[in-house]
Image (tube, grey):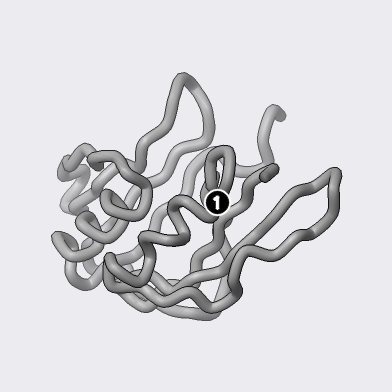
Amino acid sequence: MANAINWFEIPANNYERAIEFYSTVLGAPLHKQEIIGAKMAFLPMEGQGVGGAVCCAEGYEPGSSGSLVYLNGGEDLAVPLARVAAAGGEVVVPKTKISDEIGYFAIFMDSEGNKMAFHSAG
């Protein structure tokens, strides 16, 4: 098993608002598609890595409890984290050093009320 996670879905009540939020924060467009009655917008990724999508359908309820997904913050998570508030979210835990070996993390609330996080080496 290469990764403990191979896919994740971020629930959204307002699909277009959530797409705009993640497109802005991640600095890249999301590809939209409807699959088996669910609206999905795929987060950017390269190759065969772990992927995920913003999802809007019956049974998808945003929330701040439960699993916490750490998105790739790139070289320095301060870059996408700086876009969170302007995109309609809120920074809950600022960029914080874990250790020299592990790097940094930050936690934020997205436009839909989901608690999410970033991780980066720098």
Give above or below for 34 relative to 19: above
Q: Nearer the viewer, residue 17 or 63?
A: 17
Q: Is residue 4 left or right of residue 79?
A: right
Give the quadrant of residue 56: bottom left
Residues packed near mark 1 inside 10 Å, few (<14), some (14 to 19) or many (20 plus): many
Q: Is residue 71 above or below residue 85?
A: above
Q: Quadrant of the C terminus?
A: top right
110 or 81, which lies in front? 81
Q: Residue at x 35, y 48 (%)?
A: 53
Seen from the viewer's position, the closer of residues 29 and 58 is 29
Q: Is residue 8 left or right of residue 29?
A: right
Residue 19 in view: yes
Image point (56%, 74%), residue name:
66
Residue 61 visible? The answer is no
Q: Identify residue for label 1.
A: 77
Q: Is residue 108 above or below residue 49?
A: below
Q: Amino acid at mark 1?
A: Leu
Image quarter where the N terminus lies is top right
Given the current orientation, which residue lies at the most extreme top position?
A: 47
In this picture, residue 14 sits left or right of residue 49:
left
Q: How many marks?
A: 1
Lateral position of residue 74 relative to residue 36, left or right: right
Q: Position of residue 4 (x, y in %)?
A: 68, 42
Find numbered disc 1 in the image and state the secondary structure of the residue it sits on.
Answer: loop
- The residue closer to the viewer here, 45 or 99, is 99
Choose top left, top right, bottom left or bottom right for residue 5: top right
Q: Position of residue 25 (x, y in %)?
A: 35, 54
- Residue at 53% in and 55% down: 78
